[in-house]
Amino acid sequence: MKKNQHFRKVIAAATLALTAISPSFAQSNLGSACGCPPVASRPDVLLSSLTGFTAVSGTYGGELTQGAVLTCANNYIIDQKIYIPSGKTLTINPGTVLKGRVAPFISGTTTVDPAKASALTIEKGGKIMAEGTADCQIVFTAEADPMDGSYAIANKGMWGGVVILGKATNNLTLSPNGPFVAGGGASAGKLCVANGLGTMEGFATSNTQDQFGVNLTLGETFDDNDNSGILKYVSIRHAGAILSVGSELNGLSLASVGRGTTIDHLEIISSADDNIEFFGGTVNVRYVAGLFGNDDMFDYDLGWSGKAQFLFGMKTDNTASVDSDNGFEADSDDQKSNNSPRSIPVIYNATIVGNDKTVLTSDNSSIAAINAKELTGGEIYNSVFANFKNGFNMVKSVGTRTGGYEAYHNWTNTSGVGTPILKVKCNTFVGVTNPITVGSSAASVLAVDTVQFKQTDMNTVIAGNTLPGFSYAFTVNNNTNTFSVKNDLVPNPALSVSGCPVPPADGFFRAANYRGAFESNGNNWLSDWSYTQILGATQGLVACPTDINKDGITNIDDFLIFAPAFGTSCN
């Protein structure tokens, strides 16, 4: 028994030392565990060539009117804006690869034509059934990605992304959130078509295919149990292209998506905009990683009231070309209309690592681990935030808003100020310059604010990179995907949650008696196929220590890699 334990430890050490031998193997052999051929040998099939494809007037794309079933026998090219209409289903089998096509240049120029950017949209009433497995992920990536590990994480916004539209609650009202005008202009940012009905941010048409929610004016009602399908063990990479002037998609956009939808084990890599953004809705998400994006890691707005647990976010380096935005950007209503319902998600167990940027870019209002603004609510518990300029920032100035409260007033316990619907408790802030700010200013924080933040709400602050077992330091070459310095995301010993709120036993949340996204015993919910694992971006996270070549199976191939290194030193 002792020998077996020792052998397992040696194998684990060898894994850490040897995964750099062939980091691309799992990519070129994606799906081998479920019988898929090598990615490079699969023929390309345009989604617009599938049976039933019908062009949609006014947009560069069309609907798959019969739905579709995609298998790993092919690579599928998202060559236009592809829509799955109401009543139809897009089924994607494990190990399948879909590649988004970059938009062509405007004729006679070297400027990309945003109107011709590709994207995949699941319309209201449509479904996506993308249920991969731990060793057989489904991957969305850029068409130029050869899937051999060489495609740089610096490549962002190469295609639009994945959009899911539903019928669950949002807080849109025609005034002041509309009317929506295609192309923006003076109405830029106004998404509302009718009370309860909006057009997805990024699109420039008035087509129903781009709309989410329901038309309350016509007597329609929200369906908070709406089911748009399944995303499970799915990777979305290099998305976030501009679809209309000044407006881009996110890696994954969820608009009025209902809690009947399953999103579980998802990663979003190198998005040019937010990794994932919630536009209202009630959808729950669990085990989500968002890495190397160029905007917010997790963004919610328009009254999202879902749940989330086990979230991992990591920025890329802090070079001038990289954006300086937030871990969580928490909004209720971009138009400052004082609408209800507020955004009130409940979030447990996140680990969010910034890149220590201190200079705002043009679209930033703060650089914060949690940036609470526009009258937001929400609950964030038992999480770890590291390497941001600001930790928890709240907007306090009411400005032009209708009503007398802002995000700060939704948080403070000060008698008579507001109702605390914004709760940030039992979190650990590591290496942040200003643990709490009001209006992005540490000087505006009152003494009672500090008492509430540190004592009443049991948030802890750790100066510098000094948390035992945890390191936010990393150095990466964005063009070669090489991590010369790796962070370590697992505090050891585990951070206590004694006296803290615990995830409720409600059928969604999982028991977790620690702060952060990962257990300190080495268990790791990131799949062997996840890009994080393939790149070896972090230390301390080993999904399957015996799967040395990361093909999803422990077999003779792993032993043949390990055997020549037996007895050598491992760092």
Image (cartoon, rainbow, N blue to C red):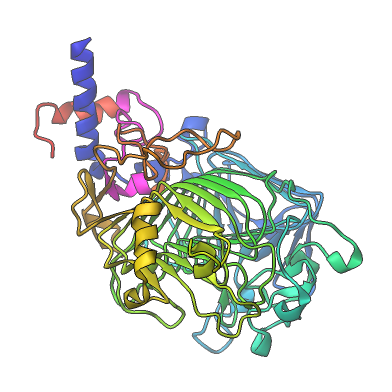
The location of residue 173, given as percent across then percent down, is: 75, 73
Q: Of 446 and 534, which appears nearest the observer? A: 446
Q: Of 134 and 150, which appears nearest the observer? A: 134
Q: Quadrant of the C terminus?
A: top left
* Residue that appears at 54% across and 69% down: 417
The location of residue 330, given as percent across then percent down, is: 52, 64
Asked if residue 95 lies in the magenta stretch, the reply is: no
* Residue that appears at 80% across and 50% down: 66
Q: Main secondary structure of the magenta part?
A: loop
Q: Of 292 and 150, which appears nearest the observer? A: 292
Q: Of 397 and 386, which appears nearest the observer? A: 397
In the depicted structure, whether residue 447 falls above or below residue 430:
below
| Residue 439, quarter of picture | bottom left
Question: Would you say 225 lies left or right of 10 here?
Answer: right
Asked if residue 547 lies in the magenta stretch, the reply is: yes
The location of residue 437, given as percent across then percent down, is: 37, 70
Q: Is residue 64 visible?
A: yes
In the depicted structure, whether residue 359 falls above or below residue 96:
below
Q: Quadrant of the N terminus?
A: top left
The location of residue 506, given as percent across then percent down, is: 60, 35
What range of the chain is rendered magenta?
Answer: 532-557
Question: Would you say 297 lies left or right of 80 here?
Answer: left
* Residue that appears at 31% across and 69% down: 389
Question: Would you say 12 lies left or right of 313 here?
Answer: left
Q: Is residue 154 visible?
A: no
